[in-house]
Image (tube, rainbow, N blue to C red):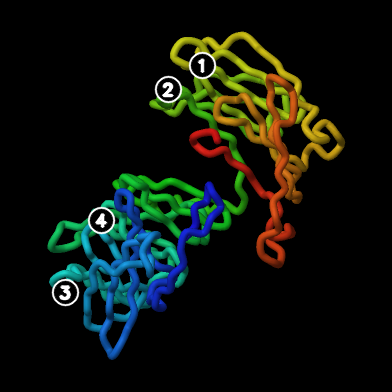
Amino acid sequence: MYDILKDVQLSEGTLLPSRACNPLTHWGGDSLLLATSFEIGGKITINIHDLQPTSSPPFLVTESFLLQPHEGIFSFSPVSFHASFFDIEDVVILNVRDLEILLRIDGTTRSNREGSQCFSPDGRFFAYMTEAYEIHVWKNMCTVYVPWSNFVPQFPDPCGFAFSPSAISILSWGTYGIELLENHLRPPSPKNTRHHRRTVEHLVAYSAGGTCIATARPYESVVTILDPLLNTPQQYINTNMRIRDIKIFDNVLFVADEHELVSWDLGAGGTGRDAHGVRRATIDRISGIGAASVETWWLKLSNDCSQIAAAAAGGRTVSLYDIKTQEILNECTMENIGQGFLEGCAVGDIRDMRFSPDGR
C-alpha cells in the first residue's frame, strides 16, 4: 500500500492466491475492503480483509465463510454479502451468510474476458456479458434475483463494463470506443445495431450545474453549444482555430489551439444563446509550440482555464504554462514504465493528460 501524494510505501503484505483474476476491492467509509476466494480441501473459503496500514499484517481478515465448491470466476458484493461464480455455461449467486442459492442460470455462454461480470457498487444489481457480447442485468430482490434488462453495446468487440456508483447506468468499453448504457432501457433490435469500425474523437465541456454543454472535434473550428435537456444545438461558434481543447468556467467558453487561448462569454446562466465578446491570449511560447511539429503535441486546459499542460506525443516531458504571466511554471519528465510497444508507441510515452478534479 502506497501514499501516492507523498510517494511513500506504507505497508506490504501477502494474500493467498484468489480464484478472482484480481482481489475484489470496495471502499467502505475510511477503510478499504478486499474479498478473496480460494479452495482448500475441496471447500471454498471466502475471506473479507480490512486494509489497516498500521497493522502487521495490514490485511486483517474480519470475516470468513466456508462454501461448497463452485466452478467459475468469482466476484463478491460486500454490501449484500452475495457471491457469484461465473462458469463457461452457468452462473450461480448465493448468500455467503446462510449459503442459500439466490440465482442459478444454466446454459449461458459467457465471455471469457476479465471484467465480464460484476455486482453494482450498491449491491442492487448483478450483470454479466455473454460470448455474443450481450450484457444481462439481474436485480437483487433480497431472496431472489429477477431479470432486469439486456444490453447490446453498439461498438463491436467490447472488452468489459462497469456499473456507475449509483447503479443507474452501465459503462461499456472496447477497442472501438466507450459508451454509456442506461440500465432501464431495452436493447435495440439486432437489425438496427450499428457496428462502428472507426471512431471520431470529441471534446466535451460543461458548465457548473450542467446548464450548458459544448462539444467540438479536435483540429476542426466549430464549437456546438447544446441544450442539456433537449440534447439539441442552441448555437454554433466558428472559432477560426484548429481546436485542441475546450473548457467552460464561470459561464465563459475557453478554446485553445497551439497558438492562442480564446474565450467567449456565454451570457446569463451560461445558456450559450447570447454568447458575445472575445478575449485572446497568446500561448505559443510553450516549449516549442508554434514549431512545425505542433500537431504532435497534447494540450489540456486546467479546470479554471488559468493554466495549460502541454506534452509532445511520444515524448515524456509535460510543461505547465501560466496563461496570465505567459511563463512556464514547471516541467516534469516521466520515467519509462514497463517494456515493449503498444500501437507503435513505447510503453511509458505520454498518450493523454488530465487535470484532477481539484485542479492540483
Amino acid beneath label 4: Gly
Identify the image quadrant of residue 322. Answer: top right
What residue is at 80 percent from the left and 33 percent from the top? Answer: 289
Local crowd at mark 1 within 10 Å, few (<14), some, or many (≥20)? many
Query: Residue 272: which disc?
Result: 1
Contact between labelled residues 4 and 3, with CB atoms less than 8 Å apart? no
- Marks 3 and 4 sit apart, C-alpha to C-alpha, by 17 Å
Q: Secondary structure at mark 4?
A: loop
Q: Is residue 144 above or below residue 331?
A: below
Q: Secondary structure at mark 2?
A: loop
Image coordinates of residue 207 in percent, x first then y, are 48, 24
Q: Which residue is mark 2?
A: 211
**In the figure, is residue 256 to the left or right of 104?**
right
Give percent across and percent down for residue 219. Answer: 71, 34
Q: Give the mark, 1 or 4, whose residue is nearer the N terminus.
A: 4
Q: Position of residue 275 (x, y in %)?
A: 56, 12
Q: Earlier in the sequence, mark 3 or mark 2?
A: 3
According to the image, label 4 marks what residue? 123
Asked if residue 184 is positioned above or below residue 46 in the image, the reply reads above
Of discs 3 and 2, which sits in the foreground? 3
Q: Which mark is residue 99?
A: 3
- Do tag 1 and tag 2 residues touch (Cβ < 8 Å)? no
Q: CA distance from mark 1 to mark 3?
A: 57 Å
Residue at (59% x, 35% y) in the render: 203
Q: Nearer the viewer, mark 2 or mark 4?
A: 4
